[in-house]
Image: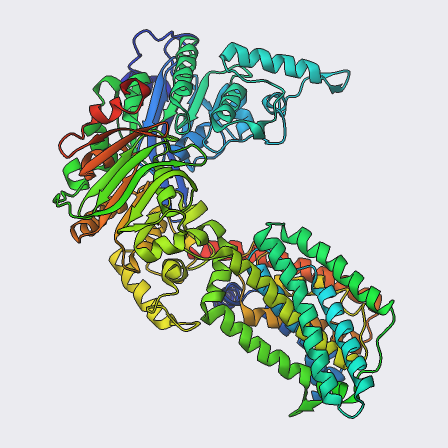
């Protein structure tokens, strides 16, 4: 008798778990598991300092992933986010050091000039992507792959492969290591951009058009949506966000570097995919993308503080991604079953 | 009950002149109490069906009536939940398409199973490639394929890549594939839907040839004229159940439609008062750049329902698409609501009050991965009702869509569910909802009832009548003849890009419309 009650209870729990899984997906569960696991493996992991550290480390990826998501929702992806970072970093550093050399007493003039130049150069990568995809109908894969090479080449050519020095100290001090209420500047920037992208995607017409174009471009066109403008905007917004991340990274490293973003295309796409953004377009939720980026930050940091070899780390990340994809497929089947 | 005794109780009405061979009148295929259950749906319930050698047996019914499920089970592509299939009198399990083919049962579905990058010959012998010394015998393959095509009378070259063939030619390849090995049962799923008149004629000749050799043919069609032309018997299905079986000679339109829909015609189509007012849309001698529409003039007035009938590919849909700005015009003039709208975009046409319901809701109509709310509001998102500045009024949006969904009786009533998870009829309601969020002067319904159940069909007709009586102009483009006959006040019949005839109220009869479907009337 008692056994049967317990069995029924266990079944109840199982059903509850299933419902939670279907409702929220695999990502929040993975995140909780990772946090619990690492907090057992290292006492330091859950300290305030380390949490602040994880947030800072994840903020760059978060910003890029937000941009990547906008493009992925339109059924594309942007492989050139890495070279957008590089272009932004190099050009902003060159402009800053140039202006600072001429006006040593006005560091903020140099910073302002560098930021404008870097942002504009980064944005131009997205504008070219957007024109190629929207007007010339080049596939996003080829267009952004091509621009990844072109952008990287430009960044290397401008610097001959050397880091660009001579950035005003104030830039790094404010946007790199500076902070407010215990959190570093990039975390705050990421937070503001998260809210901005959330509003864009859920509360504006533009966001709605991104989902519609990604879900069914023909239906969107027949409903009067300007599909070309929508596609163009997506790539421009992605580059704008990535460019901001590039400026923050430059501040953090205090130099302009051509090779800061080589792993960013894959990481940002992985963060989106694990957050449930479909590669086929039309779906994806902004808060989940932030969780996805955070999750990769947590795993990386957790393995660092618990002393996992960095060679192993790369493999673990790949396995998690595949596991998440499998779990998501399982969830889709479960939810189809529970809906009938 | 043994199958022998059952057979004697219900003897097949062997068609006159059919060449019976093999099992001496034993049906080629027979099903007994066939059931197919899907979660939440009974696709087939206790269906008894039989096919005699040398007969054409038409399956007739609405979309979703169970025809596709039945043929997919007979073709081995699907397994019944309960019931038994007998082939030549013996119980047969058709576990997969291969086993069905081994028994001589081949199906040509509407979705082709061809590899576009391979040649005709390679497709014909896919899975049974001829070899010589362990290597592919490519020359022999092409030769045998060409012989097969010639025997069937198909004007096709065996070495052409399938992707460069027209749809009709691809269908010939599919049919040729069925004839590759010994064939006893041929299943054709709406084979003439995309064929021209001449291609249809050669298909019918082929069917006659196959019949004479004792092949049994299961033929799905929506066209009553085809039933008269080639069928021996008709089985009508509705909601997964067999409603009746009769000789094709007794199958007239009224009976068939009433059996199919389960109600008399007068209850399906509402009577609309004919009160034409000012002209809303006028196309004057328009021709499209792609040649699908040639020198067509039509006009639609407010307060009337105008139909355009014709075969698939006759350009009836393209007329509306050209007016909506989807197809570039080469010649002619389009006036809408008093304005010259040549070269206008869909956005401008929408803003002027032209609403177009596309025929294929999956391809062009709906964003399946998004909710009803987002789909319904999409064409009107920039209007004050849903937007202020760049921000959306999501509460007002939900309210509007929720009201519409209630009016249209969306089921299940959940406007946040992905549209892709709804049934065909309910997806069509969402698609129609998209037309109702803003002020519209002209509603164009392009195949408004494709793949929807009877009750949805009835409510769509009622809605069309309401819109017309409310003073809107309505254009109905349809391959469904009864829709033209019973709903429209006035109708155009098109053939190969031209308007063949304009029929006024009172002149729209089945014979008149059909007689203009083909060239001879011109």
How many labels, in total? 0
Camera sees residue A39: no
Q: Is residue B212 above or below residue B165?
A: above
Residue shown at 52%/10% (left/top)? Answer: B151
- Which one is in front, B332 or A146? B332
Residue shown at 41%/73% (left/top)? Answer: B389
Camera sees residue B243: yes
- Which one is in front, B233 or A58? A58
The image shows residue B521 at horizontal and vertical percentages of: 27, 19
Q: Is residue B16 above or below residue A274?
A: above
Task: Specify whether A307 is left or right of B148.
Answer: right
**Quarter holding residue B37:** top left
The chosen color scheme is: rainbow
The image shows residue B49 at horizontal and vertical percentages of: 34, 25
For the N terminus of chain B, the quadrant is: top left
The image shows residue B494 at horizontal and vertical percentages of: 31, 30
Task: Specify whether A42 is left or right of B193.
Answer: right
The image shows residue A200 at horizontal and vertical percentages of: 51, 71
For the C terminus of chain B, the quadrant is: top left
Residue shown at 38%/7% (left/top)? Answer: B19
Residue shown at 40%/24% (left/top)? Answer: B196
- Which one is in front, B365 or A83? A83
Q: Is residue B238 above or below residue B390?
A: above
- Which one is in front, A288 or B328? B328
Task: Specify whether B50 is left or right of A94.
Answer: left
């Amino acid at each position: 008798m008692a056994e049967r009650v317990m069995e029924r209870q266990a079944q109840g729990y199982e059903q509850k778990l299933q419902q939670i899984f279907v409702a929220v997906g695999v990502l929040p569960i993975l995140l909780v598991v990772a946090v619990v696991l690492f907090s057992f493996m290292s006492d330091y992991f859950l300290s305030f300092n380390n949490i602040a550290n994880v947030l800072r480390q994840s903020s760059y990826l978060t910003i890029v992933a937000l941009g990547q998501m906008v493009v992925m929702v339109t059924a594309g992806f942007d492989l050139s986010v890495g070279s957008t970072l590089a272009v932004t970093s190099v050009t902003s550093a060159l402009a800053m050091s140039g202006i600072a050399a001429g006006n040593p007493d006005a560091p903020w003039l140099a910073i302002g000039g560098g930021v404008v130049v870097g942002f504009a150069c980064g944005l131009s990568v997205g504008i070219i992507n957007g024109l190629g995809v929207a007007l010339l109908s080049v596939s996003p894969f080829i267009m952004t792959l091509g621009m990844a090479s072109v952008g990287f080449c430009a960044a290397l050519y401008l610097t001959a492969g050397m880091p660009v020095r001579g950035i005003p100290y104030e830039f790094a001090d404010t946007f790199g290591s500076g902070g407010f209420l215990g959190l570093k500047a990039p975390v705050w920037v990421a937070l503001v951009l998260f809210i901005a992208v959330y509003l864009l995607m859920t509360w504006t017409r533009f966001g709605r058009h991104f989902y519609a174009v990604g879900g069914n471009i023909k239906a969107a066109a027949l409903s009067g949506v300007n599909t070309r403008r929508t596609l163009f905007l997506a790539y421009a917004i992605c580059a704008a966000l990535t460019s901001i991340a590039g400026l923050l990274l430059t501040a953090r490293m205090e130099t302009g570097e051509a090779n800061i973003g080589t792993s960013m295309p894959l990481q940002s796409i992985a963060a989106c995919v694990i957050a449930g953004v479909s590669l086929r377009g039309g779906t994806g939720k902004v808060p989940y993308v932030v969780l996805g980026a955070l999750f990769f930050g947590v795993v990386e940091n957790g393995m660092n503080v618990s002393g996992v070899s960095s060679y192993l780390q790369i493999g673990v990340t790949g396995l998690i991604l595949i596991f998440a994809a499998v779990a998501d497929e399982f969830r889709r089947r479960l939810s189809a079953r529970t809906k009938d | 009950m043994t199958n022998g005794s059952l057979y004697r109780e219900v003897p097949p009405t062997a068609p006159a002149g059919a060449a019976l061979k093999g099992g001496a009148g034993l049906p080629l295929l027979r099903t007994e109490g066939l059931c197919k259950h899907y979660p939440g749906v009974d696709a087939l319930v206790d269906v008894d069906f039989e096919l005699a050698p040398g007969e054409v047996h038409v399956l007739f019914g609405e979309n979703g009536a169970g025809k596709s499920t039945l043929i997919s089970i007979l073709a081995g592509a699907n397994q019944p939940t309960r019931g038994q299939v007998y082939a030549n009198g013996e119980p047969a399990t058709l576990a997969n398409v291969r086993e069905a083919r081994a028994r001589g049962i081949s199906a040509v579905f509407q979705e082709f199973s061809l590899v576009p990058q391979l040649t005709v010959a390679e497709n014909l012998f896919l899975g049974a490639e001829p070899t010589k010394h362990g290597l592919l015998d490519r020359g022999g393959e092409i030769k045998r394929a060409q012989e097969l095509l010639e025997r069937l009378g198909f004007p096709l070259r065996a070495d052409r890549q399938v992707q460069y063939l027209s749809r009709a030619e691809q269908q010939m390849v599919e049919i040729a594939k069925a004839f590759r090995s010994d064939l006893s049962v041929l299943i054709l799923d709406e084979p003439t839907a995309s064929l021209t008149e001449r291609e249809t004629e050669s298909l019918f000749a082929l069917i006659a040839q196959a019949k004479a050799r004792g092949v049994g043919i299961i033929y799905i069609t929506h066209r009553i004229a085809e039933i008269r032309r080639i069928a021996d018997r008709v089985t009508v299905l509705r909601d997964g159940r067999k409603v009746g079986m009769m000789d094709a000679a007794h199958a007239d339109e009224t009976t068939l439609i009433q059996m199919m829909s389960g109600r008399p015609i007068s209850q399906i189509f509402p009577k609309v008062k004919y009160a034409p007012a000012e002209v809303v849309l006028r196309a004057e001698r328009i021709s499209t750049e792609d040649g699908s529409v040639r020198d067509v003039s039509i006009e639609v007035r407010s307060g009337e329902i105008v139909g355009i009938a014709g075969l698939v590919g006759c350009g009836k849909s393209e007329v509306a698409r050209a007016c909506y700005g989807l197809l570039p015009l080469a010649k002619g003039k389009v006036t809408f609501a008093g304005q010259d709208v040549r070269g206008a975009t869909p956005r401008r046409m929408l803003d002027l009050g032209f609403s177009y319901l596309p025929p294929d809701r999956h391809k062009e109509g709906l964003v399946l991965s998004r909710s009803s709310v987002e789909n319904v509001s999409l064409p009107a998102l920039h209007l004050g009702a849903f937007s202020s500045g760049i921000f959306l009024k999501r509460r007002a949006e939900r309210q509007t869509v929720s009201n519409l969904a209630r009016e249209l009786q969306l089921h299940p009533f959940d406007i946040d569910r992905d549209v892709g998870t709804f049934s065909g009829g309910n997806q069509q309601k969402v698609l129609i909802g998209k037309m109702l969020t803003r002020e519209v002067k002209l509603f164009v319904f392009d195949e408004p009832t494709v793949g929807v159940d009877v009750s949805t069909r009835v409510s769509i007709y009622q809605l069309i009548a309401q819109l017309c009586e409310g003073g809107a102009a309505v254009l109905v483009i349809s391959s469904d003849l009864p829709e033209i006959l019973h709903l429209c006040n006035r109708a155009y019949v098109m053939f190969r890009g031209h308007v063949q005839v304009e029929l006024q109220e009172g002149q729209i009869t089945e014979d008149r419309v059909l007689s203009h479907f083909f060239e001879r009337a011109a």
